Amino acid sequence: MFEDRPAEFDTGLMDALLETELAADEALGLANAGAIDGNDVGANGYELYFIGDDPMVMWRVLEPVFAAAPVAWTRVELRNGLDDTSPTVLVHD
């Protein structure tokens, strides 16, 4: 998640994050660790969704991609399936 922006979401920023989104999907595919499942744009944030078998493996692949994004990620939820009520939550410093 790239959220908690001080102003309404900037569509230019959304366009910039498209490259991050594509790079993340490619990295997961090359690692055979998952794929992108979609995105969501809100008033003050942008969320990316990924699917795969092992959320920790996926995060090891995604973390360097997110580190290179034009804006810092704010939160990551590592879920074991859609019904996981206790995901591991990572917060960017």
Image (cartoon, grey):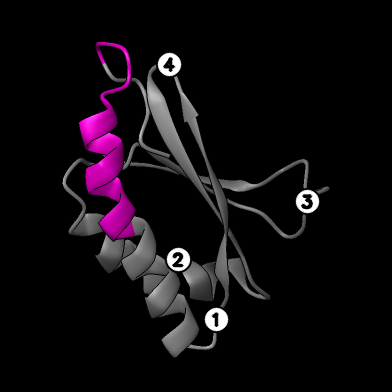
Return the residue at label 1: 33
At label 2, counting other C-alpha atoms closer than 10 Å, the crowd grade (few under 14, some 14-19, many 20 or more) is some
Q: What is the quadrant of residue 46 in the picture?
A: top left
Q: Which quarter of the rendering shows the C terminus?
A: top left
Q: Residue furthest top?
A: 7
Q: Nearer the viewer, mark 3 or mark 4?
A: 4
Q: Do the residues labelled 2 and 4 touch (CB within 8 Å)?
A: no
Return the residue at label 4: 43
Return the residue at label 3: 82
Q: What element carries label 3?
A: loop
- Depth order, front residue of 70/4: 70
Overall secondary structure of the magenta section: helix
Q: Which of marks 1 and 4 is in front?
A: 4
Query: Callout 1, which amino acid?
Result: Ala
At label 4, counting other C-alpha atoms closer than 10 Å, the crowd grade (few under 14, some 14-19, many 20 or more) is few
In this picture, which residue range is highlighted in magenta? 6-20
Q: Is mark 1 on a helix, strand or loop?
A: loop
- Depth order, front residue of 91/4: 4
Going 38% across and 78% down the picture, which residue do you hit? Answer: 27
Return the residue at label 2: 59
Distance Cα–Cα, label 3 vs label 4 = 24 Å
Q: Is residue 55 left or right of residue 48?
A: right
Q: In this view, does 81 lie to the left or right of 62?
A: right
Q: Which of marks 2 and 4 is in front?
A: 4
